[in-house]
Image (cartoon, rainbow, N blue to C red):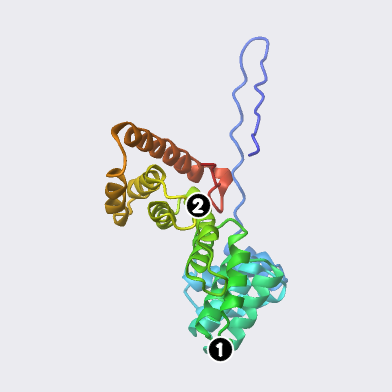
Amino acid sequence: MRTLVLTLLLLPCAARAADPAPALAVPSLDEIKAKASGGDAGAQLRLAMYLDSGLYVKQDQAEAVKWFLKAAEQGDPEARFSLARHYMEGSGAARNVPEAVRWYKKAAAENNYMAAQMNLAALYRAGNGVRKDLKEAARWTRKAADQGDSLAERAMADLYFNGTGVKKDPAAAAEWYRRSALRGDTAAQRLLAAQYAEGMGVARNHGTAYKWFSIAAMNGDTEAIAGRDAAAAGLNKAQLDDAALAAEQLNARIQKAAKEMFTYPHPQMVTE
């Protein structure tokens, strides 16, 4: 994180008041339109987003699609993703699944755009607009997971746990659930706990199961409560106290990492 250092100039008789920071220049709508018409991809995307949402302008999704297309043709990943979404939904343009797939593929392959990779994986799993191919779905899920997104990591864990598009591997599932859990995904925290409770892919450990069930419950996963209580039954008081303390400390670190500005767009994965 860059730190802005301000130096106070001390005068012989008195301290000079700091000048107010200049306001950030925000382009006007007319300026954005002019830049978009001049071929600026960033302005084209911005204008498309305004038109798509109705922010600052009258909502016009057909016009939004036109500008998303212009930015997409220049290689903007968000524009490519948004254009694909409009073609898939039939909003602002006639529904065109092959075109949606084409633009998802461009964003996923050429821009390594995680959201496009996940949507493309879903299409391959369902056989929507493409031939159903669970291996191809798993390949795109892995590309997204490798970028550190907790939802993609949990999705990858699910594939290994169930043997969907990949060889069934509970140990690999546990590792992907762990990565997602350490970024704060509550479902992954509960599912990892369940693997420790059952000894699936990991050595059975009531203390570790209790820790992860507790963390999931702390973060609002009500399904984890029964698992936490069941794991507690296998621990003596000292073990239970240790597991409870470990859960509190680890959860505090996970939450702190998730709130840090520098972790955007994905929470930092802490160590266990």
Furthest toward the top, the residue is 13
Residue 75 visible, this angle:
yes
Q: Position of residue 113 (x, y in %)?
A: 63, 66
Q: Position of residue 110 (x, y in %)?
A: 71, 70
Q: Depth check: 248 or 192 in front?
A: 192
Locate the N terminus by quadrant: top right
Q: Amino acid at mark 1?
A: Asn
Identify which residue is drawn at 59% across, 23% down.
17
Residue 125: give its label.
none
Identify which residue is drawn at 52% across, 66% down.
160
Q: Depth check: 110 or 95 in front?
A: 110
Is residue 116 toward the left or the right of residue 12 in the image?
left
Identify which residue is drawn at 27% across, 53% down.
226
Residue identified by numbered label 1? 96
Q: Quadrant of residue 19?
A: top right
Sooner in the amino-acid sequence: mark 2 or mark 1: 1
Q: Amino acid at mark 2?
A: Arg
Marks 2 and 1, Cα distance to the nearest angstrom? 38 Å
Residue 116 visible, this angle:
no
Identify which residue is drawn at 33% across, 33% down.
241
Residue identified by numbered label 2? 178
